[in-house]
Amino acid sequence: MRFSTGLAAASVLMLAGSAWAQEAAPVVAPAAVPTSDWRAVPAENLLVIDTSKGRILVELAPEVAPGHVERIRLLAGRGFYDGQFWHRVIDQFMAQTGDPLGTGEGQSPYPDLKAEFTFRRDGQTPFTAVAAPAGAVLGILHSLPVQTQPDAFMATTADRKVHAWGLYCPGVAGMARDDAPDSANSQFFLMRQPYPSLDKRYTIWGRVVSGLDVVRALKFSSNPDGIVADPDRMTRVRVASDLPEAERPAARVLDTASPQFRALAEAARQARGADFSVCDIDLPVQVAGAPAA
């Protein structure tokens, strides 16, 4: 059963004089953010999920899960996800879709994927550290929360890389599977809340950069299996680069290499104290372009 074994259990501010809208974050970035401190999400890495409840934008993470990102791009480009239901939604947990049958048993006609629970990181990977508990480093890769071994370990490995993995914070996109690790295919889920017990057990392939409020607004079930009666659906799913210019949204995220991000991360650490988690950092985003289809 493609129920993901083990998964059982913002207001918008318009910027003056700009076509961009900025989503509020729990810890707000300093008011005056230079244009150079924003990072544009490449159109080929921006998944546009239009739903019956609104639009969700997911930044793909090919450095983390290249095979799964390739599959998402393929299925989106062929319209496979259009009209599919959010068939399994559990409040305080996640929303699952990608089954053409709408029962949790369906998948695409393509072969199952090899698991990509972890990845290898080198000194050129665009990773920004925000905390360093003993023997580990926490930070952000593009928009994705990540845990990794320290850079110092690179000198001890043959490929000069270290072990790293994504973390299941709110908005993180994961791939559903059966009991077998290499059984993911087309079904995926978006996190409504953090769920660290999934880390390194389900492939992470991206994170919601806009529309987490939509993910949390999807109709959920109170049943233990999470199967939703009369569920919400995806109306159209495309990678932004596959859309005509007139229909293509654009997203810019606060650059994690910027002083503004460092201030944001430090504010989150100070606010949370000993309870700080990398999930407490919500990157501000600006969105422009065509409205939802």
Image (cartoon, rainbow, N blue to C red):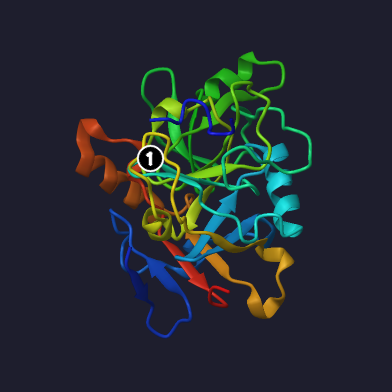
Q: Position of residue 204 (x, y in %)?
A: 56, 37
Viewer-proximal residue, 225 or 78? 225
Residue visible at 48% across and 81% down in the picture:
19
Quadrant location of the C terminus?
Answer: bottom right
Viewer-proximal residue, 96 or 121? 96
Amino acid tagged 1: Phe
Q: Position of residue 234 (x, y in %)?
A: 56, 60
Residue 46 located left or right of residue 7: right
Q: Residue furthest bottom?
A: 17
Residue 105 located left or right of residue 169: right
Viewer-proximal residue, 49 or 66? 49
Residue visible at 29% across and 59% down in the picture:
28
Task: Say if 7 sits above or below 30 in the image.
Answer: above
Task: Say if 159 sits above or below 76 in the image.
Answer: above
Q: Secondary structure at mark 1?
A: loop
The residue singled out by tag 1 in the image is 93
Q: Position of residue 286 (x, y in %)?
A: 46, 67
